[in-house]
Image (cartoon, rainbow, N blue to C red):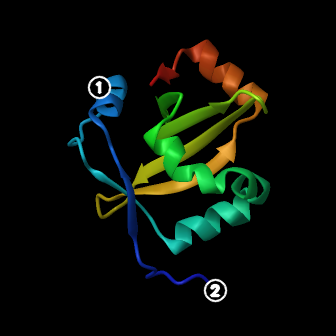
Amino acid sequence: MINRYSRKREIAKITDRVIYLLELDVKAGTPIYINDNNIERIKRKHPEDFTKYGSDLIEIINNPTYVSLHPVHGSIEYIRVYRKEQDYVLVGVRVSTTENYYVRTLFVMSNEKVYRYWLKGVLRTY
């Protein structure tokens, strides 16, 4: 069973550049957290992707290739392109009910999803 009250850890901050590119109404330097529940959720939903890229999670947030905003729930999407593998790895960060930003997901985007993002013009070069 997952502990609902696992300790949150700050792993990054929302930068001025992300705020500018995505036109966010958030203060620069707002912390991004992760906790054990988030990690367990990612491992459960995307085990192969977490095994391959989980150790890069903080680097993806701090140095993405692109950023985007999810059209439905407003998650900040940090996307890093790994050219050798042709993988677009997305780390989703969502605001919680307590107004804290948490890593919610990490996965390799499907080719179809990448194509839809390109067609819609929602990828912002970081």
**x and y percent of residue 27 in the render?**
20, 43
**Alpha carbon of mark 1 to alpha carbon of mark 2: how far?**
40 Å
**x and y percent of residue 7 in the render?**
41, 78
Along the line of sight, the residue nearer the viewer: 82 or 97: 82
Q: Residue at x 54, y 15 (%)?
A: 121
**x and y percent of residue 61 in the render?**
47, 43
Residue position marked by numbered label 2 in the rendering:
1
Label 2 sits on a secondary structure element that is loop
Amino acid type, callout 2: Met
Q: Which one is closest to the eye, mark 1 or mark 2? A: 1
Instruction: Tell me where residue 116 sits by quadrant.
Output: top right
Residue 6 is tagged as: none
Q: Is residue 126 left or right of residue 85?
A: left
Q: Identify the image quadrant of the N terminus.
A: bottom right
Instruction: Look at the image and tell me whether residue 73 can be seen.
Output: no
Q: Is residue 41 left or right of residue 74?
A: right
For residue 7, above or below residue 108: below
For residue 74, above or below residue 94: above
Along the line of sight, the residue nearer the viewer: 24 or 18: 18
Q: Residue at x 34, y 62 (%)?
A: 97
Local crowd size for mark 1, using a 10 Å CA cut-off: few (<14), some (14–19), many (≥20): few
Amino acid type, callout 1: Tyr
Residue position marked by numbered label 1 in the rendering:
20
Label 1 sits on a secondary structure element that is helix
